[in-house]
């Protein structure tokens, strides 16, 4: 009897489920634990987290000097890199939801201009100083800065 059948395989990363199924099958493991946020520990997720943490540290260290820092999500556009991702057999196999989202965006000929315009508006608003209390945050184009300010509890 395979002693590994009594264990569960815990996995993480962007393609955690696909890899875990192959590994579990090869080892004879019968249960796989996949946390709902397993993809956060992907290479992309870890890189994004490092960027956000850097911004948080800079914000904390420079607060006394009146310097505010922000991490901004600029939006998505169909570029040559996006096209190569759509065409990649590896991406199709391991990142099907990303390929589907990019393909849909391309096929709908979705204009990225409004999202990029919003990103520019975000930069102007953040540079005004009005939102300095949000320093150290990761901000996305659909964020309502005024609502975020209201959520901050007074010190």
Image (tube, rainbow, N blue to C red):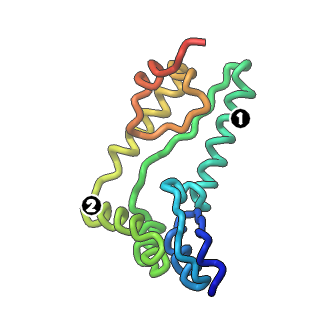
Screen quadrant of the N terminus: bottom right
Q: Earlier in the sequence, mark 1 or mark 2?
A: 1
Query: Mark 1 — residue?
Result: 57
Q: Between marks 1 and 2, how big is the CA–CA gap? A: 39 Å
Image vertical order of residue 22 relative to residue 67, above or below: below
Which residue is drawn at the image coordinates 53% and 69% (left, top)?
A: 32
In this rendering, would 51 be left or right of 139?
Answer: right
- According to the image, label 2 marks what residue? 109
Q: Is residue 118 above or below residue 108?
A: above
Placement of 47 over or under 25, stated as above or below = above
Residue at 41% x, 77% y is 87
Q: Residue at x 57, y 22 (%)?
A: 132
Question: Residue 136 appears in which quarter of the rendering?
Answer: top right
The answer to which image quadrant residue 137 occupies is top right
Q: Nearer the viewer, residue 2 or 55?
A: 2
SS category of the residue bearing label 1: helix
Query: What is the x, y in percent for residue 139?
Result: 49, 37
Horizontal and vertical percent position of residue 130 = 51, 18
What x and y, as percent, mark residue 107?
26, 66
Q: Is residue 111 above or below residue 142?
A: below
Residue 114 in percent (x, y) is at: 33, 44
């Amino acid at each position: 009897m395979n002693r590994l059948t009594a264990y569960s395989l815990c996995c993480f990363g962007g393609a955690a489920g696909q890899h875990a199924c192959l590994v579990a099958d090869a080892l004879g493991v019968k249960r796989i634990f996949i946390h709902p946020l397993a993809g956060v520990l992907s290479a992309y997720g870890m890189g994004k987290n490092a960027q956000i943490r850097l911004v948080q540290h800079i914000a904390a260290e420079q607060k006394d000097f009146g310097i505010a820092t922000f991490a901004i999500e600029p939006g998505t556009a169909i570029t040559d890199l996006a096209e190569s991702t759509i065409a990649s057999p590896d991406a199709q196999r391991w990142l099907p939801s990303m390929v589907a989202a990019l393909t849909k965006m391309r096929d709908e000929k979705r204009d990225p201009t409004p999202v990029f315009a919003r990103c520019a508006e975000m930069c102007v608003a953040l540079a005004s100083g009005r939102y300095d209390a949000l320093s150290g945050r990761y901000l996305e184009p659909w964020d309502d800065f005024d609502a975020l300010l209201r959520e901050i509890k007074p010190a």
